[in-house]
Amino acid sequence: MELVQLRQLVCISQEKVLSHAAEKLNISQSALSRSIQRLEDELGMQLFSRTKNSMSLNEAGLVIAEQAKLVLEDVRALSAKAEALKNKSLPLHIATCAPAPLWKLAAELGTAFPAVSISSEMPDEDSIVGLLLAEKADLAIVRKPIASGAIESVPFMEEQLFMQIPLSDELSRKKSIRFADLAGKEIREYTKTGFWHKVHRDCIPGARYIEYDDLMVYTNVIKSQCPLTFVTELGNTLHVERDGCVTVPITDAEATARYRLAFLRKSEPRLGGIVSWAVHAAKQW
C-alpha cells in the first residue's frame, strides 16, 4: 500500500467521477483505475461498484476513504513535526559584509523559524567566500556575485544610506545631498558597519569623525544630541523622530548597497527552505 494510492482514493471520493479525479491528479484515467485495482487487491476487497461505463465507491470504499483521510492527516502532521525538529536542531551561522541587513534578516528569521539558533560574524568582506567554502558559515550576505561553482548567490535586499542633519546645518535645507557636501563636516559614526566604514572615508574628503564602538552608547548620543550622522532604513533608525533634525538621502551610487544571499549549493537542502523563504520575504521588507 502506498500513500499515493490513498491520496488517489480520497481524490476520487471528493470528485465523485473517475475522469475528474484523474484530471485533478494529472494522470490518465486508465492509470488511476489500475492503481486503485492494485489497492483493492492488497486490501482483499472491492472498494467500488462497477458498471460498464462507470465506477463509484461502495459502502466499504466510503469507509476506507474516510480512514485514508485520517492517515494522510497524520502524515502531514508527521512531516510538520519532522520539519520543526530539523529547524530546532539547525544552528545557523551567518557571515555578513554589513550589520543592518543581518539585523533585519535575524529579526524576521526569528519569527518565521523560531527554533533556529542564529550566530553571526562580520569579517573582512574578502574572506567571506573562504568561510563558505570551509563550511564555517551557512549563509553569507555579500554585495557581488561569487565566481564559484560551489556557491550560489541570489539577489536579496537593498540598503540606502541617508544623513540625519541638524536644522542648524545649511545642508538641512536640501532635498538630497552627495558625499562631497559632507567634506570637512564633523560626523558621529558607529564604527562596526562593515564595508560602510571604508565607503565613508573614501567618499567624504576631510570629514572629522567622532567614533563609537558601543552601539548602545552611540544610539543614546544620537537620540539626545541630534548630531550629523548616517542612518538607513534597515538599521531601524531612519524614521526615529529626533527634534531639531531632518533626514536627507545621499544620492551617490556608493550610498546604495545591493546585497546577495550566498550559500553552498550542497548545503541548500540542509537549510530547510530558509533561503527561498528569505529571498521571497525580503521583497516585502
Image (tube, rainbow, N blue to C red):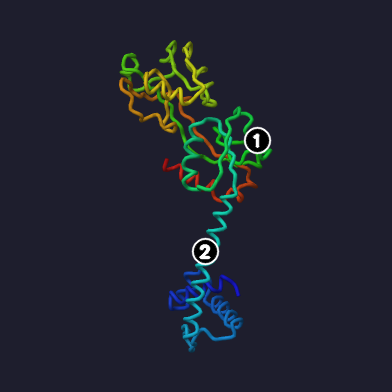
The earlier-in-sequence mark between 1 and 2 is: 2
Q: Amino acid at mark 1?
A: Leu
Where 61 sits versus 282, above or below? below
For label 1, the residue is 131
For the point 52% across and 84% down, the residue is 47
Q: Residue furthest bottom?
A: 51
Query: Which x, y percent locates residue 103?
Result: 49, 35
97 to the left or right of 204: right
Query: Which x, y percent locates residue 275?
Result: 54, 46
Quick one: quadrant of the N terminus? bottom right
Closer to the camera in the image, 258 or 84: 84
Q: How many marks?
A: 2
194 to the left or right of 244: right
Where 145 sits versus 206, above or below? below
For label 2, the residue is 76
Residue 218, numbered label: none
